[in-house]
Amino acid sequence: MAQFIDRAKIFVQGGHGGNGCVAFRREKFVPKGGPSGGNGGKGGDVILEADRNVHTLLDFKYKRHYKAERGRHGEGNKRTGRSGEDLIIKVPVGTVVKDAETGKVLGDLNKHGQRLIVAKGGRGGRGNAEFATPTRRTPDFAEPGEPGEERWVELELKLLADVGLIGFPNAGKSTFLSRVTAAKPEIADYPFTTLRPILGVAKVGDFSFVVADIPGLIEGAHAGKGLGHEFLRHVERTKLLLHLIDLTDMTRDPKEAFEKINKELELYSLELTQKPQIVVGTKIDALTDRSKIEELKNYFEKKGYPFFAVSAVTGEGMNELMWFVSKKLKELEVEDVE
């Protein structure tokens, strides 16, 4: 299964409870006036909520401290302070939550909408009206609010790849991945540079998704040659395939390269050929003659495959491609929900 562990560590703090109030009412027939201080409001809780529209823990790398609203203080006339608002933090479905200090698992958010309180708000302090007794009619003290719980929690997510990079060895997949994500795959000029899937998180606007550089295919992969079966199992788990073709390869025609890889997918599983594919011509920075790019674009688009020509080295064409990929993934999500 093409997956990796995405981790983040965050500090959460429940809101402090509001202080109780010391107050006395002034009424004509009440000796010295009765105590009327209200209670403080409860502090807000910090709550994690699993959301199918959140895909990675990337945002928690940039914001690590979360605090819920404190409760309001009590007021006279026995008015209780307003409770603080809960702070709801959206996390991906499949997030395991652990106490960072003890390692204890606090919860496993594996269903959309599931919630977990990770830091409770403090209780509000009692006002002086609460302390009146027959023998202590005019208490002149109140309780302070309790502090909210605070702790460091670890979020851990087993991620399946949304996008799989396929193509022959040396098609430029590792360089491509290192350009669009923070992953650092080993890159070298020999077949099978990638011996196991390497995954990274790509972010386009406010949308993030997981990209896998899957080991290169060779002919006969469906029969187990090279890294065949392992490769094909990983491909099965992805939602969208980027089919990378080296446009500088003098030994293999781009159309032939495309057909051979797809033949291997088909021989292994017909379902694989039904996955959406985007064809990506790579290494255009090294092309001396770019006239064939337009011809290839027409060829693949007539077959129903979007085509982009890019250079992962210079970045040419990459932005346009990645925005298209994010748009396509969003469309696929809507189809899944429906």
Image (tube, grey):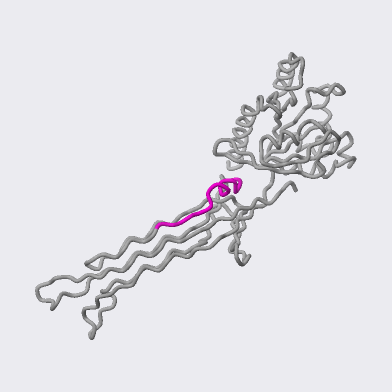
- Residue 244 vertical position relative to residue 236 in the rendered view, above or below: above
Q: Which residue is at a point 76% across and 38% down the rendered structure image?
A: 271
Location of residue 181 by image quarter: top right
Q: How many marks?
A: 0
Location of residue 215 by image quarter: top right
- Residue 177 vertical position relative to residue 91 in the rendered view, above or below: above
Q: Which residue is at a point 74% across and 25% down the rendered structure image?
A: 281
Q: Does residue 233 appear left or right of residue 93 in this picture?
A: right
Q: Position of residue 73 (x, y in %)?
A: 31, 63
Q: Does residue 203 appear left or right of residue 36 in this picture?
A: right
Q: Does residue 105 appear left or right of residue 291 in this picture?
A: left
Q: Closest to the observer: 144 or 162?
A: 144
Specify whether residue 149 is painted magenta.
no
Extent of the magenta region: 55-69
Most extreme residue toward the left, as rendered? Answer: 28
Q: Position of residue 56 (x, y in %)?
A: 61, 46
Location of residue 185 by image quarter: top right
Q: Which residue is at a point 63% across and 55% down the rendered structure image?
A: 156
Q: Position of residue 207 (x, y in %)?
A: 57, 39
Specify whether residue 56 is painted magenta.
yes
Quadrant location, the C terminus: top right
Most extreme residue toward the bottom, as rendered? Answer: 135
Q: Closest to the observer: 109 or 205?
A: 205
Q: Position of residue 91 (x, y in %)?
A: 56, 51
